[in-house]
Each structure stands twice: as structure tokens, then as C-alpha cells.
Amino acid sequence: MRGKRRPIPKVPTKIAGLDEILEGGLPRGRTTLVSGGPGSGKTVLGLEFLFRGAMAGEPGVFITFEERAAAIRLNARSMGWDLPALEKSGKIAIIEARMPGEEILSGDFDIQGMLAIAGGHAKRIGAKRIVMDALDMLLQVYDDKKREHDELARLHNWLVDRGLTSVLSVKTHRDDNHGLQYEFLDFMADCVIRLDHRVTGQVATRRLRVIKYRGSGFGTNEYPYVFAEHGIVLFPLTITELTHQPLGAKVSTGLKGLDRMLDGGFRRASCILISGNSGTGKTTLASTFARAACLRGERVFYLNFEESKEAMISGMLSPGIDLRPSIRARKLMIQTAMPESTGSDDHLNRVIEAIADFKPSHMILDAVSACVRMGSEQAAFDFMMRLISVVKERGITTILTNQVNGPSNEEEISGIGFSSVVDAVVQLRFVETGQQVNRQVFIVKSRGSSHSNRRQLYVITDGGIEFPERPQRPPVRRAKALQKVGGK
């Protein structure tokens, strides 16, 4: 007879994105092993787990085998965590367990004394959690594998007997064979997490992977993470079902001629790609949309990877688009960044934080083509896919510009392979007519909406983008078109 499935008890870490990967948190009353090389964030993860727990009413003990307690407190303050205040209120206890050199050399260190001290502090504050940082320093004391295993088994039993949810961290190095080095710890722990700090294309990135989790499912991929202002932030894509908001009503592009071509404008909550050669007016079109939205009282977040805020504002004055009133009214927020200044994960976190604070109705990214400078085409693709997922879940209308270097009908529209998730594509290009070079716009697609199937000339003047007046065929309506094909 099949019994009812019972999920194991878990403790939420409250670390951004981690609980989603762990399907709820770390195993309650059990042991989690966190391993990684220098700079991967093992100490930060352990400290944040303890800090978030203390703030939620679960006191904890932090045992450091390497750093001094004063350094731990100072490092935590850089994240905004006031450990001394929590120590004073009896919510956290920090213990230095650094072994004297003579004990390491003689191998006389006994873990029992350290456990007695830890037990006293745990009882005093009613601890529910415990973190032992740099446990590998303890392992170096024992030159005998059997004794090492015996002491670790004693430690494990001590933790389990007291029902403490524990996190043990150990260092690994790039050339280390982790499986041989800490094989016993891997088998002993109920949950094993690897942190990796790597350099790809001269850009440093960090990745987290859950190796095992007894009695629970978990995200099995590698997940990027960054050290944000207030702790670790992970960017998991673990949900198999899409949770994007449905496309909404039409919103004006700010240009009557383009609105006619789109049968009223862009759909709200849609993702629009404006693609074209340099000089075709991609930024001008995007800025026109931004100004029109701000005049309607809606907020627009403009992310520019191509030029500074001052240069962009000044440049848009030429076609008569003054963005300064919208900025002063706090309806337009412009954020600029050099793509190569940091990794794609840091850029993504910066954008997500800005969106969370500003709460825009619309977002503009100028330009997708610059994202490749974040390290690689794969890094740019990961950045764009995660960003598009975030904005679609929030129902934010998003305009992306992309510069193409040749005839746009000969190139992949987005440049980095994500055009299938775009809802509308507006293609801008130059056309030669006799001795003249003109600009032309074409609606490649507009998901969930009728649109013009003709190319339309436009000009950029001192008053913005203008469409020459001429008879325009009405937009193709899909229902009517199907009736004609069917002979009805």
C-alpha cells in the first residue's frame, strides 16, 4: 500500500533565491555542508543564514576556526548586519575556536572541549541554528584518517542529538579533488552545496550547485549569485511553468504613424525589440515612447549601455525630445553602465534592485548588442533571458534596442538568439532611392495583434520622428484574412 508523501521539515534561509532552489530551505535539525574556494562566499552564506534566523526569532551560534570574531563582526557590518546588537540581545553567539600551533603540531586537540563550550552558549541563548566556519582547519589537526572520521562522527551526533540545524563550511581549491578530500563529510551531511568562483572571458562569476539533498527535491542546475548590498542574491530559473503576465491593452508608442501601423500601439506587458543599423533612430524612437508614457503619468526605467545619462539627454534635444521634465517629475529613471565593468550577474542584480525600488510600468534597454561586452555571447544571452523573465512576471512593458551591422534581413534579429521570446519586432533600416538615402520602418511581428504588412518611410526632424502623409492600407486583420483564404 502506497503511503502519503510527507515532505521533510525545512528551515527557510531567507537568502534571496536560495529557498527556491532548495524547495523551501535547509533540512531542519540536520547538517548541511557548504564547500568552495577562496572568495566564493562560504562565510557570508553561513553568516546570512544565522543573521536571517536571528531576525526571525531563531537564535544561533557561529563558530569560526580561522578568522577572529572581531573580523567577523566587521565584515558583517559591511552587509548591514549588526551582529554586536544581536549578541547583546542574546540572539547570536560568536565563538573563536582557532587552534594554537602547538596543538596542531602535536595532534592533541580534542573536539569534546570545543563542543562543551558551544553547547553552553547554545543553551544560554536557546540556539536553533549553528554555523561552523572553516571546519577544514579542524581537520588539519588530525593526521590519522580514522581519528578524523571518529571526531567528525562525534560532531555530527552532537549536532543531531541537540536538534540543531547546522551549516559546516570547508575550503576547496581549484585543483583539489573534493570527493577524495572530504568524502566522509559528503556522505555524513544531509545537504551538500558547492560554491564556485570562476573567471570566464576575464569576467569573474560565481555559481552555486546543490550536490545532494536527502529526502527532498532541489534545483539541479548551476545558479549564478552575487554579493549585493544586503547579502547574497541568487538568480534561479527553477520553475518549469511560465508565470508571465498576459499581454494587456494597447499603449501608444508616442507616434501616430507607428500607432497606425501597430493598430493602436504596443501591447502592455509585452516585450518589443527595435532593431536597426546605427543612425536609424532606435534611441530616438525609444525615447519618444518614454516621454509619451511619462506625460501619461506612468513611470519608465531607462537602462543605457551605450552612452552616459548626460550625453543621452543632450543628444535627444536635437530631435526635440526633452527628457529633463520627466526626470524632474520622477517619472523617468535613467541608469547607465559600462557592460564590461562587471559580470552579467552583477548587472542583472543592479537592474532588479532598481525595478524593485522604482516600480516602473515600462522599461527600455539600450542596447542588447552592447550586452556581449559583459564577457561573452552566452553571458549576454543569460542576462537577457533572466531579465525578460523578471519583467514579464511583473507585467512591465519592455522595449529593447539592438544594433545590427549589416542588412537586417540577413541577420538574426536580436543578435544573441532570444528573439523567440519577443512579442513584437520593429525593424528600422536605410533604403537608397536614386541619389537619396531614406529611413524605413517595418513591423516584423506583433504577437496577439494585427499590424501593417507594409514598409513605411519616416524622417527624423527637429520635432522628432515624422511619417510623411500618404494613403495607408488598413492593418491586416487575421480573422478577415482567414475568411478570404477559406472562400467565405
Image (cartoon, rainbow, N blue to C red):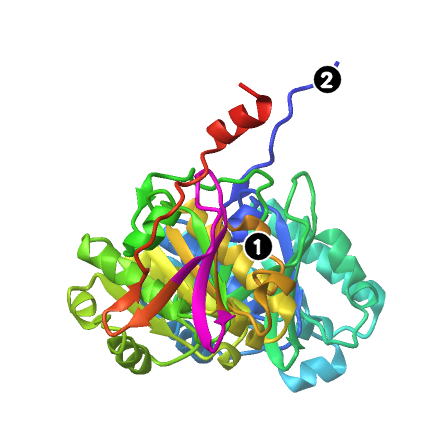
At 34% from the left and 47% from the top, the residue drawn is 260
- Of the residues tagged 2 and 1, which is closer to the observer? 1
Relative placement, left or right, of 264 versus 337 is left
For label 1, the SS is: helix
Q: How crowded is mark 2: few (under 14 residues within 10 Å), some or many (20 or more)?
A: few
Q: In terms of depth relative to the viewer, which is nearer, 287 or 468?
A: 468
Q: Is residue 199 above or below residue 130?
A: below
At 49% from the left and 42% from the top, the residue drawn is 447
Relative placement, left or right, of 93 versus 358 is right
Which residues are the magenta region? Answer: 431-457
Q: Is residue 480 above or below residue 416?
A: above
Task: Tell whether position 37 is magenta.
Answer: no
Task: Tell whether position 454 is magenta.
Answer: yes
Q: In terms of depth relative to the viewer, which is nearer, 331 or 120?
A: 331
Nearest to N terminus: mark 2 or mark 1: 2
Most extreme residue toward the front, as rendered? Answer: 434
Q: Where is residue 282 in the image (x, y as percent from the top left)?
A: 41, 67
Q: What residue type is labelled 1?
A: Ser
CA distance separating discs 2 and 1: 46 Å
Q: Determine which residue is flagged by label 1.
A: 419
Most extreme residue toward the top, as rendered? Answer: 1
For label 2, the SS is: loop
Circle number at residue 333: none
Relative placement, left or right, of 256 versus 435 is left
Q: In terms of depth relative to the viewer, which is nearer, 433 or 279?
A: 433
Kindly tell me whether residue 302 is visible in this rendering: no
Q: Determine which residue is flagged by label 2.
A: 2
